Every structure is written in C-alpha cells, then in structure tokens.
Image (tube, helix red, strand yellow):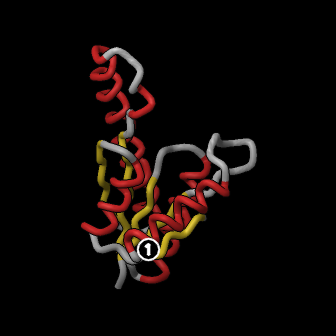
Amino acid sequence: MGKILCSTRGGEASYRAQDAAIALAKEQGDSLIFLYVVDLHFLDKTRRSTIVPVEQEVTKMGKFLLVMAQERAAEQGVTAETICRKGEFHPELANTAREETVSLIVLGRPADGESMFKLTALQTFAAEVERETGVETRII
C-alpha cells in the first residue's frame, strides 16, 4: 500500500487533480494526503505590517480548501489527511514528500488560458521534484 500526496491551491486544475488522486487512492488502496502551502513570497516588496493579516487570511483559506478536498474524498469513500505548511512551495512539497514517505506526488495540470502557470514550466518543476525526492511526480 502506497501513499499519494496531492498538492492543492483551489481552482479547476486542483479539483481535477484531487479527483484523480482520490480515484487512484481508491483503486490502489493507497492512503491520501492533501497539501496546501502558504507561500507569501509574492509579498516580499510589501510593508511588513500588511503581511501578518494576509498570512492569517491565506492560511485560513488554505485550511478551508483542505477541508473541502477531504470532504470530496470522503464522499467517494476515501479517508484523506491534510497538511498545511508555510514557506516556499517547492521545498515544502519536497520535504513533505520525504517526511511522509509518499509513493506518488500529484500536481494539477493547468488548463489553457485558465492559469498563469504554463505546462512546460510545471513539467520542469515536476521533473526537479522527482529528481530531488525519488518520488514519481505526475501532472494530472
């Protein structure tokens, strides 16, 4: 029995990735973990006084998205754990994968025109994470 780590951030790509991860966990009898990373590096050029309230709100939103993902899994008969981390996404994803000894990392595939993330950049990112962790990283 393996363990699947599915990162989530909300939006259609995340929902598709969640559904695929849930289906894989159910089909393979794997356990499932949803991960949300509170990454506030986009605020690096902002005054420090505004960061604390933003961090609290983004953390609340992340925890809410995790509960929603957990409920989606439960509706399909899959029990899922949730993890909310703070920091840069790449190292937090890799560290969580290692700490939780996962067998698969699932990332959501951006839809054309739906996301600021480009598929080629995500493929490069997935390859880096896979190389770093030794864990298969699948874009769904």
The amino acid type of the residue labelled 1 equals Leu
- How busy is the neighbourhood of tag 1: few (under 14 within 10 Å), some, or many (20 plus)? many
Displayed quadrant of residue 57: top left
Q: Secondary structure at mark 1?
A: strand
Q: Position of residue 97 (x, y in %)?
A: 34, 66
Q: Position of residue 74 (x, y in %)?
A: 40, 61
Q: Between 41 and 32, which is closer to the camera in this rendering?
A: 41
Residue at the disc numbered 1:
104
Residue 22, above or below 37: below
Q: Between 85 and 23, which is closer to the camera in this rendering?
A: 85
Question: Where's the N terminus, which quadrant?
Answer: bottom left
* Image side of residue 107 versus residue 97, left or right: right
Q: Position of residue 18 (x, y in %)?
A: 51, 59
* Image side of residue 28 versus residue 118, left or right: left
Question: Where's the C terminus, which quadrant?
Answer: bottom right
Residue 27 seen anywhere in this rendered image of the structure: yes
The residue located at (39%, 77%) in the rendering is 103
